[in-house]
Amino acid sequence: MPELPELNPVIHGKLRLAVLSLLVAVEEADFTWLRTKTGSTDGNLGAQMVKLEEAGYVTVEKRFLERKPQTLYRLTDAGRHALAEYVQALRELLGSAL
C-alpha cells in the first residue's frame, strides 16, 4: 500500500481552510468580511486567526478607520506555500477519485 500524504493539521481545520481559501484570492481582508464570508462567530474566527498567525500563514495589521478599530489579514508567502502543499496532498490522497 502506498504511503498516504500528511495533511497539515493547521490548515485542515474547516474554518482555517476556508479563511486561507478566501485570503488566497485577495490582497487583504478585514475581520468583519472574513466573519461574514465564513458565517463564523467572532470568538471562533478570532481563535482560528491566532493559530494561523502563530503558524506564520497570515499577518495581522490593527488600525483605526474613522475612529473604529479594524483588523486586516494578509496571506504570507509561507501561508500560500502551505496551502498549495495541502491542496497537492489532498489530490494525492484522493487520487483517481476525482
Image (spheres, rainbow, N blue to C red):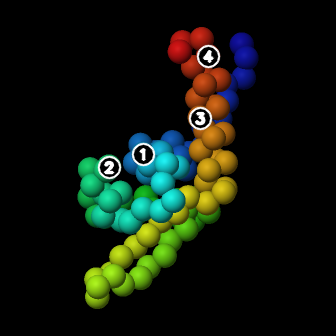
The alpha-carbon separation of the residues under discs 2 and 3 comes to 19 Å
The alpha-carbon separation of the residues under discs 3 and 4 comes to 12 Å
What residue is pinned by disc 1?
18
**Of pointers 1 and 4, the one earlier in the residue sequence:** 1
What residue is pinned by disc 3?
87
Q: Do residues under tags 2 and 3 come within 8 Å of each other at their CB atoms?
A: no
What residue is pinned by disc 2?
38
Q: Is residue 91 above or below residue 79?
A: above
Q: Do residues under tags 2 and 1 come within 8 Å of each other at their CB atoms?
A: yes
As helix, strand or loop, the secondary structure at mark 2 comes to helix
Q: Do residues under tags 1 and 4 come within 8 Å of each other at their CB atoms?
A: no
The alpha-carbon separation of the residues under discs 1 and 3 comes to 13 Å
As helix, strand or loop, the secondary structure at mark 4 comes to helix
Residue 93, quarter of the rendered image: top right
**Of pointers 3 and 4, the one earlier in the residue sequence:** 3
The alpha-carbon separation of the residues under discs 2 and 1 comes to 7 Å
Q: Amino acid at mark 4?
A: Gly
Q: Which of the labelled discs sits on residue 6, or is there none?
A: none
Q: Position of residue 1 (x, y in %)?
A: 71, 13
Q: Do residues under tags 3 and 4 come within 8 Å of each other at their CB atoms?
A: no
Q: Amino acid at mark 3?
A: Val
What residue is pinned by disc 4?
95
Q: Position of residue 49 (x, y in %)?
A: 45, 62
Q: Is residue 45 above or below residue 17?
A: below
Q: Is residue 44 left or right of residue 4?
A: left
